[in-house]
Every structure is written in C-alpha cells, then in structure tokens.
Amino acid sequence: MNKLILENFEISETSPIFIIAEIGINHNGNISQAMKLTKNAIECGANCVKFQFYKTDEFLSNKDHLYEYEVKGLKKQESMYEMFKRFELKPEDYEKLFKYIRNKNCIPLASAADPQSVKLLLKLGASAIKIASEDLINVRLLEYVSKINKPVLLSTGMADKFELEHALSILNKKELILMHCTSIYPAVPEELNLKKITTLQGYNYITGYSDHSKGILASIAAVTLGAKVIEKHFTLNNNDTGPDHSFSAKPKEFRQLVSCIREIEKSLGSEKLKPSPKEMELRNSYRRSIVAARDIQINEIITEEMINFKRPGNGLKPYEKEKVLNKKVIRALNKDNMITLQDIDN
C-alpha cells in the first residue's frame, strides 16, 4: 500500500481512517448553508470537508432531462439542468469555505468535473483531486489530471473491470486512492457489494468507500474490510429538497460514525499471529501446565494416567507432555505438583 500525505494528514496502512464529510451540493446553492454545514461537519470530527466543483452547462446537453430523487420518503422529479444550475456556487464562495476549513485544521477537498474545476481546485491549494464515478470514463478529464502532480481519489461506481483499468492507465498515478461506491441514491444493502473493497485492494492502491446508503453500518463494515478513507454525505435536514439529503448523515449520526470508526481502529490491531502484550501477561494465569494426577513416588515411570493439565500455566505446556511421558521420576511428587524437567531422569 502506498502512503499519501494530504496537508497535515497521512493516509497509510497504519494511519487513522481519513473521514470525509461530503457536503457535495447539500448546500443547495446557498453559501450561508454551505458554511453552516461545514462548521457542523468539522465539529462532528470530520478530517475533511468535500464539495463538488462543476458547471452545469459543461456536463449536461439535454435541458429537458429529468432527475428523480427522494424527499420525505416520496419520489420527486425535476429538470436535472435546473436543479444542478440552482446548486452552483461561485468560485469566491469556495474560496471562503476552503479558507474557513483550513483555519479549523481540517482539509478542504472537492470533486472536479472538468478542467476548469481542476484549475479552481489548484488555485485554492487543494492537496488532492477527487474524480467522481460518473467521470471515470471522462478520458479528457483523466488525461488533464494525469499531467498534474497531485494525488487522486477515484470513485469506481458503475465501472466494470475494463473501464477501471483503462482509467488507471490514463491517470498513471502512484499516489491514488480507489474509492468503492454504489452509484445509487440511496443505495440499499443488496446493492452495496462491500466485498469489492477487497478486490480493489488487489490493485495495490489505498482503498476507501464512498457511502450512499442510509445509516452508518456500511461505512463501519467498510473499515473492517480495510477501507482507509470513508466518505459520507452530510446534511442538517434529511427532508431538505435536493438529491442527496435523504441518505445523508445528520450531525448526531455523523458524530456516531466518527466515534465508531475510532473505536474500530483500536480493535483491528495487528494481523500478526501472536498474542497481544496484555494476553502475554495473562497467559500464565489462564493456561494449564503439566501436573501430577496423583502422588508419584521416586523411580515410578510416568504414564498418561499419571499426569493432568491444570492452571497456572507457568510450567511445562500440555503439548510438551512427550518430554515427561515414559520417564523415571527422581524425586517424589504430590498430587497437583507441577512436573518439571528437574523431576525426571532425562
């Protein structure tokens, strides 16, 4: 696994999980709401606050194309063009947001949908470039980003093996994070396919998970599968009008997510097959040693029926019984006495 440094945060095999609060377009095109969301996300423990940089006229050709999403449990349809146009923020708005985020010792980030958005990211001093799932096949964007010396977070939603590997070949990046995601909003458990995280790990990049499901269970499970980056949409109101509010985490839920991830980090520990330091301290107390099953006299030959295994475990281990079986006892042993190598004729 590679190591990435994003401003003051290291992302590696041994580093804490990098937690992104994805505000995206949940600001609804309002800088005041964007600032309020940002402030709350940072207070909830996010390492990074992320937005989406785009120009609606750049990526959408059909102004009559409809977009359907959930509001208050009901399906709502509206013009995709009008919706995304309404949610655009100005470059100076993002400048304020990025400055605020950095002043709070947090990392600002955004996905970039076109070269102009990439240029804005660079102007704002972004430490990495996020490429959203829908742009994994946007070869012009990939070619443009490949020439920029910045780490890339690449979302893999909707991609098959060929498309993913083609994108990776164009980007040609060593510093890259592969983000598993399901591009369904919201994504139900049957569509999450979290095991893809382990498949992505086979490409020898850092892996992460961009969560579009309701709740925090999927993100927590992703951490146990090895995701080092978790991206979760963030809102203040699940009933707000907009495509992502319904499945986003509110502050209380996001704070719980951060807390759970930090606890899981401690629990995952080491992959090595050896006891923990505390277990080593307790082995003698909890394990068994070879002891006399009855009183044993001098010159008796030890047989299987003459030994037992009992606590404490600071003597010969049960799996070492061959060291004492069929050996002559050279000093008398009482029942439950530990049998040592000094007690037998070697």
Image (spheres, rainbow, N blue to C red):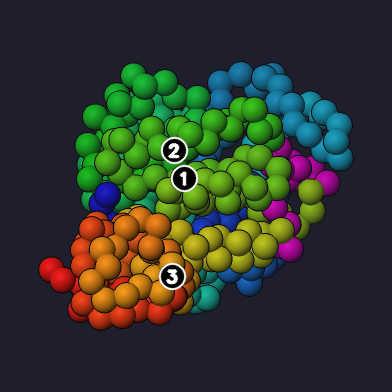
Q: CA distance from mark 3 to mark 2?
A: 57 Å
Q: CA distance from mark 3 to mark 1?
A: 51 Å
Q: Residues within 10 Å of mark 3 (few under 14, many from 20)?
A: some
What residue do we see at 81% from left, 29% from top?
76
Q: Look at mark 3 in the image and give the residue it sits on.
A: 294
Q: Amino acid at mark 3?
A: Arg
* Mark 2, secondary structure of its residue: helix
Lower position in the chain sequence, tag 3 or tag 1: 1
Residue 242 lies within the magenta run: yes
Lower position in the chain sequence, tag 1 or tag 2: 2
In the picture as drawn, the residue positioned furthest to the left comes out as 346
Q: Look at mark 1 in the image and give the residue it sits on.
A: 225
Residue segment shown in magenta: 239-252
Q: Are marks 1 and 2 in contact (CB under 8 Å)?
A: yes
Give the x, y percent position of residue 7: 35, 67
Judged by its main secondary structure, the magenta piece is: loop
Q: Look at mark 2 in the image and give the residue it sits on.
A: 197
Give the x, y percent position of residue 331: 25, 80
